[in-house]
Image (tube, grey):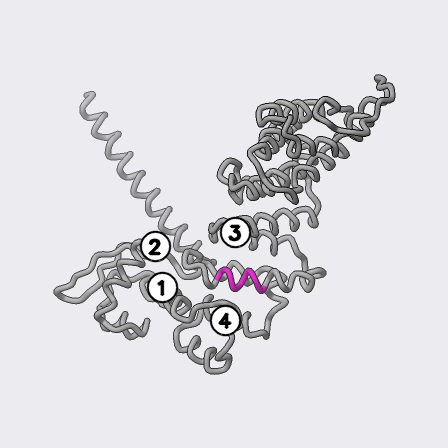
Amino acid sequence: LTKVGVENVDASEVTQENWPSAFISHIPQLRVCFRSDKVTESDAIDLLTTISSLVIGLPGDYIEEAVNKLCELYEDFSEPKNRKHFAKLYSLNVLFTGLPEDHHSRYRVYRALVTCASELGALSQIYTQTEKVATLLKVCRCAPAECQSLWRLMSEVHQSSGNTKLATQAMINLLSTYSEGNAAGARDDALKCILAVIQDPSFLSHNRLMSLKPVQFLEGEPVYKLLEIYVSGGLGDFAAFMKKNPTFLAENGLDEKACLDKLRTLSLMKIAENVAELDYATVCKKIDLPEDQLEAFIIEAVRQRVITCKLDQINKRILITGALPRNFGAAQWQSLYRLLKEWESGLRVVQSGLATMIGTTTQ
């Protein structure tokens, strides 16, 4: 530190007993790596990865304090960014992989990793999948407040990077951490989540939100009524909602055409479930769409994988081979169970037939 121009370095004697506290006290001075021209990018990487290795080797009682100080230093981007800031990612990766898998401080390191990667435009260099983040929180035995803090951060960084799907998943996981006793404190998060889900064309399982306590807390408000329409309502319900709340969509950043298109997709899923074919006229009436726009709409629905079908353009019929259920509840589980049992029975017949053929051939 002295070599690269740090002043006021503690020159007192370092012993076997006091080296951990002496080491930790100097962590804030590592800021020189990003400020001094005497420190090259290579120097910064070497020094900060070495620091991480030393943190891992600290006596157990000192690790949490050292990790917190190091993460606070790395999360500070108040000064102009330069290539040397990428050394933070190298250092945090060493720390994250070097600590025991169930060490609680890995949670703090991961938060710093997400912040730094987002600031440096390198979010793709770390894992951010919802399932893996949930596993980390569970293994590290994180408190509800820590889970909420990380899920909120994940939602924000995904939203800023344009990944609305992962942003929505993170927000749903955030809301799932609240109980009936503290759901009122998550009102703003619940509102944001519902709006994000409605405007995300790839999110179609709206009934998942109804079991979340913060969402239930909004019952009676316009946003909750709009969510109910996307869970089980139709275009007529949407028209009635707009008549009663004409400015709601604009005030909350929702596009009316996009909202209608998504509701048409949900309506298609509902009428296509458990049927083999539909005629053009019936579908157009159900989703309130002119016939000359129907085929393009169906093709987009196939692209979204909400329905698999063929278009009989001559007879104006939609031949359906599969469709996602609008809501997946007890009835859908029972249907899936029956289908799997039918498959099992069919496979046993095939297996028995093959066994008979093999036995006959052998004889």
Q: Earlier in the sequence, mark 2 or mark 3?
A: 3
**To which residue does mark 4 refer?**
226
Kindly indicate the quadrant of the structure image that contains residue 187. Answer: bottom right
- The amino acid type found where label 1 is placed reads Thr
Badges 1 and 4: C-beta atoms under 8 Å apart? no
* Left or right side of 72 for 252: left
**To which residue does mark 2 refer?**
304
Q: Could you classify mark 2 by the number of other residues whose Cα lies within 10 Å: few (under 14), some (14-19), or many (20 or more)?
A: few
- Under tag 2, what secondary structure? loop
Q: Give me the C-alpha separation between circle 2 and circle 3.
A: 24 Å
- The amino acid type found where label 2 is placed reads Gln
- The amino acid type found where label 4 is placed reads Leu
Note whether 341 is above or below 287 in the view shown: above
Q: Position of residue 35 (x, y in %)?
A: 66, 34
Q: Position of residue 325 (x, y in %)?
A: 39, 59
Kindly indicate the quadrant of the structure image that contains residue 279. Answer: bottom left
Quarter of the image containing the C terminus?
top left
Q: Which residues are magenta?
A: 191-197
- Under tag 4, what secondary structure? helix
**To which residue does mark 1 refer?**
265
Q: Nearer the viewer, residue 350 or 276?
A: 276
**To which residue does mark 3 refer?**
160
Q: Earlier in the sequence, mark 2 or mark 1?
A: 1
Q: Could you classify mark 1 by the number of other residues whose Cα lies within 10 Å: few (under 14), some (14-19), or many (20 or more)?
A: many
Write the residue at 30% across / 53% down: 303
